[in-house]
Amino acid sequence: MMRGKFVFFSAVLAGIALTVLAPPAQATFKLYIQEYTAGGATVGGPMTFTGTEPGSGVGVILGAVGSTANFTFSFNASQNAATSAMPSLHLDNFSIGTGVVTTDYLVIGLSEGDSGHGYLNGGGGPLISNLSSIAGIGAATVTFQSFADASNNLFGVPSGTTVPPPGNPFVPPLMASGGAVAAPTITMNASNSGSGITTSTPFTASGRFSMTQVATVTGLDIGQTISFNGTTTVTPAPDGLVLALSGLPVLGFYYLRRRVKLTPA
């Protein structure tokens, strides 16, 4: 009988070890940059960058630089592990400048998702969008939007999503999805660039989900360079087990107090 219990216990331990040691699925995230005219027409082809996240590490695109017809830019992009308790996308130190007089603007999209990829944190949680650390804003304007998609589409956004200005649909590569939600758009300019702005919206997911962020930069003057950070995060909903365990100290105190009362003098 003891041997049977030992074999069963060993099997349980082996199962736990396999669960802990099994590496998470590899994740891939992509960044898409497109220049537009003031009327919404594309200028040249898009520029794309891809970063991978092996194992449980952090995926990065470090020190990427490039240029479109009228703009030069550089940035760092990163994401935490797809199975992290608090998934996030980061567009850090995005710097954009122009050496010409132009009314064109730049749209930057960053996303993680698609079949075999995406995030998994046990039910989702509030989608939080943050734009901060703007430097050299001048007369320019930066808008920032964050999305989460329970259908796990890469660049998955709610149907009808537009990117200002002039409000034309940012079709490539955004994908309309019935499972997507959007945090309220953040707009930052000279009047409010002194501190970060955060918005949020409820979000739930029963399996893997994607996250996307889109930034638009307009109104750059000749010789001007601005920079900013954009962050998209899904915070985990309180775990049922954690909530249950959090009540144990109270229950223990009640039990001890009751026992003391019942113990005869």
Image (cartoon, grey):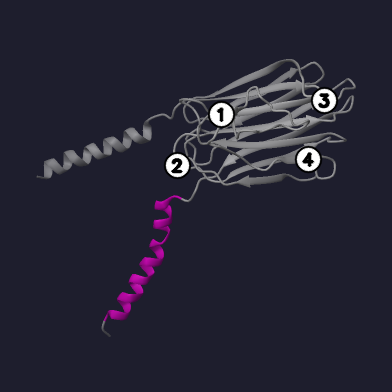
Residue 264 visible in the shown view? yes
- 1 and 4 marks in contact (CB < 8 Å): no
- Element type where label 3 sits in the image: loop
Q: Is residue 159 left or right of residue 188?
A: left
- Element type where label 4 sits in the image: strand
Q: Which residues are magenta?
A: 239-263
- 3 and 4 marks in contact (CB < 8 Å): no
Which residue type does callout 3 highlight?
A: Ala
Q: Is residue 237 left or right of residue 127?
A: left
Q: Is residue 253 magenta?
A: yes
Which residue type does callout 1 highlight?
A: Glu
Q: Nearer the viewer, mark 1 or mark 3?
A: 3
Q: Nearer the viewer, residue 215 or 222?
A: 215
Label 3, label 2: how far apart the Cα atoms are = 42 Å
Label 1, label 4: how far apart the Cα atoms are = 25 Å
Lower sequence index among marks 1 and 3: 3
Q: In what quadrant of the picture does the N terminus appear?
A: top left
Position in image of residue 131 (x %, y %): 71, 40
Identify the residue under disc 4: 188
Q: Nearer the viewer, mark 3 or mark 4?
A: 3
Identify the residue under disc 3: 38
Q: Nearer the viewer, residue 76 or 191?
A: 191
Q: Residues within 10 Å of mark 4 (few under 14, many from 20)?
A: many
Q: Is residue 24 magenta?
A: no
Which residue type does callout 2 highlight?
A: Gly
Lower sequence index among marks 3 and 4: 3
Identify the residue under disc 1: 112
